[in-house]
Structures are given as structure tokens and as C-alpha cells.
Image: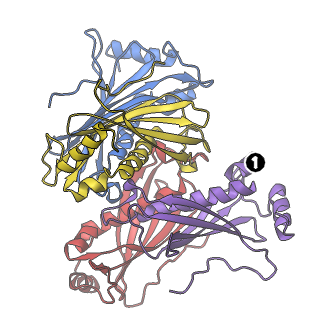
Chain colours: A yellow, B blue, C red, D purple
Amino acid sequence: MKRIEYFKRGEQDPAPLEKSVLRVVRFNEIDPMNIMWHGHYASFFEDARVALGDSYGIGYQDFYRQGFIIPVRRMQIDYLSPLQYGCEYEIKARLFYTEAARLDYDFTVLDADGSVHARGCTVQLILDKDQNLLLAKPAFFEAFCQKWREGKL
Amino acid sequence: MKRIEYFKRGEQDPAPLEKSVLRVVRFNEIDPMNIMWHGHYASFFEDARVALGDSYGIGYQDFYRQGFIIPVRRMQIDYLSPLQYGCEYEIKARLFYTEAARLDYDFTVLDADGSVHARGCTVQLILDKDQNLLLAKPAFFEAFCQKWREGKL
Amino acid sequence: MKRIEYFKRGEQDPAPLEKSVLRVVRFNEIDPMNIMWHGHYASFFEDARVALGDSYGIGYQDFYRQGFIIPVRRMQIDYLSPLQYGCEYEIKARLFYTEAARLDYDFTVLDADGSVHARGCTVQLILDKDQNLLLAKPAFFEAFCQKWREGKL
Amino acid sequence: MKRIEYFKRGEQDPAPLEKSVLRVVRFNEIDPMNIMWHGHYASFFEDARVALGDSYGIGYQDFYRQGFIIPVRRMQIDYLSPLQYGCEYEIKARLFYTEAARLDYDFTVLDADGSVHARGCTVQLILDKDQNLLLAKPAFFEAFCQKWREGKL
């Protein structure tokens, strides 16, 4: 299967930021088909997204303290191979650079052998506390993106 | 926002099958942004998909009894407007006709006023019990599709 | 098995208030032992507790609007017979009268044949918004209890 | 508050077995009161119980391979202090020795400062695959208990 590309990286764009978290398939996550229930992947993506956001100071709470919320506007998940009970796996999140006032993440779920079990993406918008959609990045996030472009993160 | 079309209906294809379920936003489904947590929508889609499948005799268990499983291969969710605590809402599933050995569902989440809060889709493949992908519909499902084409469901 | 009594009703106490909600066992609630995962019952209890609280105007949000929160301090669940996929069941909540500043609920989970699958209880304390434990009922709730004692609900 | 003792250790009984797992409070676990939703603790207990069971070869799957299932018959949870978003915490499981054909676990949820946020217990019965309740321990588990009594684990 061809590698799925959810976001296109522009030639001038800095490399995506990356962060992984590790988990083990839990008993209550297994469905009657004896595989990880497909609905749980949203929380896996969130775990990795939160880990990346927090490690760079651009997490949910960082935006919130600045007066913004960042709801998920779209999520896509491609299930390639099911996870079995007890399996250890890694969720790798990548944040893609974009000029838009948006957070574009993609995700890869892979096991210890490097087999890819799922891929996916989320797109988050940025709203102010009156629920108005931001068309430009808020100042603290633009400053962050500036450093990112300059390779100074 | 333009209406999203996840699947294209061919000119000769019979109309999609429809089924709705009703729910109320529950306390523990609300996230720290005080809206329905985005990860719960997979279970809403499943509720409506299961209701449709069961009502037509083509549900998860019907396939299973015939020796097949129908795992979700792809899911996409578009979040348009968040659900608040206590809100009553409808999840409408539609199954689209396709020649492929596949189940194509789309979903609409709407409240009592008819406001659309989310849309999405799932694509399910059909596997036999040795995990082999079916390239043609199994006989019982082809017979069902025949009736569907003939308007005899 | 002897009927479990979680709370003792005093001779002068008014009868417990009752409310039921109906549900169907969902696909993703089934665990690898092919029964309802035991961890889901907390949400069943909550559904019935919320339904009772809301119908009498003493729900989570009613307390909140008056400046109080009512966290669960203790929960006990007795699992008598597992629920299977697709089973329709009722969750019956009963609120017991008490002189204490507390909400004492018990719960019965039973199917359409009247078979009891689980019983349980929750005890909720009442805190003000500074997290101080209330030793007496807040005025609006004492007024409610007064009516209850007088049979005027 | 007095330390809760869910199980009484007999004078001749070997010390309980212990195992801990570490977790971090996740975004989607927070409820509208801005604390960990009380219903999630069942999964925390399960994580620690599974870790202990697996590490000693007496886990869910070990019983299953021998022809037995070990459903939870009772669970009790005492909530002492809520967990906040982002908090790192430890779930410590202890398995108590008993002559009965039963698994008696207690649990302590504590943060990095050693503050206890919750305690609780589960009692599991042992059934054979025809759902008959075992009155005596199965041979492989009795052999395990023998080693436990002799201090040879």
C-alpha cells in the first residue's frame, strides 16, 4: 500500500516536529472481533498530539492561557492492520508547518517490529473565547512558528 | 459550508438505505472545553451503523454467522459545531450502494432543530475468517444487494 | 442470593425516589470474555442518576447553578450476571432520603425478563465552590427534602 | 481519614503481592467538574491488576489458557481527592492471599507526592468455560499459591 500523505510539505517549509508516545493494548480496548476497537484510535492520536504540544509549549492549555481554544475540525483514520491484546505500540505525531491559522497533525501507529497498524490526521482550528474563528495565527503562536522557520526550536 | 459528499452515487445505483438513532449528550462525554469530546463520534457512527445493519439483516453478527468479518478500514469525521451537555441529537446513517465488496456508510449528526453538528463516513472491508480480503461480495450479501437494486427490500 | 441493601431506610423516612433509563448493549462495550466490560457500569449508574436528578430539579447542574458540586465519594458494584451483546436492559436508580448532606443512590440493572444483572450504589458529598465539605444541606435542597417528607413532590 | 482495609490478612497468610503502573491524567478523562471522571477508575484498577497478573503468570490469559475465566464479582471505589489534568499518578495493586477460589485485589491511586487520591478493591470469581463457579482453586493456581505460601515466588 502506498504511503498516505495527508499534508503536503511546501519546499520552503521547515521539517515537521515529531513526538512519540508508547502504549500497550489494554484488555478493555479489545472488541468482539478480538482486535483493538477502531473507535479508540482518536484517543491514541490525542495522546501523541498532547505530548508534542506540551513538549513545545503549544498544547491545548498553552493556547487556553492565551485566550484561545483549538477544537478538532477534521479527523481521518486509515486502519491498516489491527492491534492485538497485549501488543506494545508507538504513536508518532508530526506537526506540519502551515501558513494558515491551523494545526495540521498526522499520526502513525506502529509496533515494536516497525509494522504500521494505522495512520491518520487531525486538523485543528483556532478560535477565540467568543468562538470566533481566527484567520491569522495568534501572536504567541506566530512567534513560535518564526523560531520554527529559523530552525531555532 | 458546502455539503460534503463522501461517496458518489452512480446514476443506476439504488437510493442509499437510511436509519437513525437518537441520543442525549451525557455528562462523562463532555471534555474540558465543555463540549462533546471529539473522540466519541466513532461510537455514535457505530450506533447508527449497527442499527441500520441489524434492521436489514446485514449487521456485524449477520456477516459473522456467514463466516465473515467487516472491519473498518477508513473513518473520516468533519466536526461542524460542537454538541453541548444535555443536547438531544440524531445520528443518521446511510449505506451507499456499491459494486465493490465493501460497506460505504456516511453519517450526519444533527440536533432537534435540524442543525448539523458533524458529518462523517466509514468504509468497511469484508474478510473471511482467515483474514483474506474478499474481492467479490459473499453470496448472502450479493442476494441482498440484488433485492436492493430491484427495489424489493 | 440475598437482596443487597446498600442503604437503610429509617421508619420515618419518605419512600425513595425512582427513575429508570433503558439501554441496549453496544458492540464496543463487549470485552474479550464476550460480556459487557465491568468498567462500563459506572456510566450506566450515571445515566440513571442524571435522569432522576434532572427530572426532580436536583441534578448536577441544578446544584452547580446554586454554587455547589456533588462529587462521587464512594461507588460499589455487585455483578450478578453478565450482559450480552444486543441485550436491552433497564437501569433503575433510587435516591434514598437521609438527614445528612449527601446523596445516596442505589441502582439495579435488569433485563426485559426482570432478571437482575447487577446492583450497586453511589454516595455523593456536597461541596461549595471552594471545595469545602457541607455539613448541612444547602437551602434549595433542604426545601426539596421538606417537600419530599411531606409527600408533595 | 482512617485507612480503609478491604481484606483482612490472616496471621498465617503470606504477604500480599504488589505491582504498580504509572499513568498521566489525559485530556479526555476530565469531566465537566474539571476533575478525572469517577467512572475511569475501573480501568486504572484493571491496568494494575493486569500488570500484576501478567508478571506472575496468573493473569486473565493464563487462566483462560487453562480453561477458566475470572469475571469481576464486586468492585468498590473510595474517592478521596480528585485527580487534575496532567497529573502523574501511580496505581498500586495488591493481591491478597485467600483459601477461597477467588482473587482479592486492593488498589491505591497516589500521586508523585505520595498523596492518596483513591482506594478500592475488586473481587474476582473463577468459572470454568461452562460458566460453573469453582469452589476450589484450579490446579495451576493452587500450585502457584503453594509457592506463595512457601515464599518461593
Can residue C115 be seen at all in this image of the molecule?
no
Residue at the image point whose x is 53% and y is 35% from the top? A110
Q: Residue at point 40% right, 64% down?
A: D36
Name which residue lies at 73% across and 50% down.
D62
Which quadrant would residue C102 be assigned to in this image?
Answer: bottom left
Residue B136 visible in the picture: yes
Front residue of B46 and A101: A101
Q: Eyeballing the image, is D6 above or below A109?
A: below
Residue D120 at what x, y percent from top left? 55, 71
* Snapshot quadrant of residue B44: top left
Left or right of C81? Residue C66 is left
Query: How many marks do you count on the picture?
Result: 1
Left or right relative to B148: residue C119: right
Q: Out of D68 and D90, give the one closest to the viewer.
A: D90
Task: Give the image location of residue B143, x and y in percent.
Answer: 45, 15
Q: As rendered, which of A42 and D70 lies closer to the eye?
A: A42
User: What crowding class fits label 1: few (fewer than 14 Cα within 10 Å), some (14-19), or many (20 or more)?
Assistant: few
What secondary structure is found at the residue carrying circle 1? loop
- Residue C102 vertical placement versus C12 (above, below): above
Amino acid type of the residue that numbered disc 1 sits on in the rendered structure? Gly
The subunit letter for the residue under badge 1 reads D
Where does residue C109 sit, x and y in percent of width and height? 47, 61
- What residue sits right under mark 1 in the picture? D67
Say if B103 sits above or below A86 in the image: above
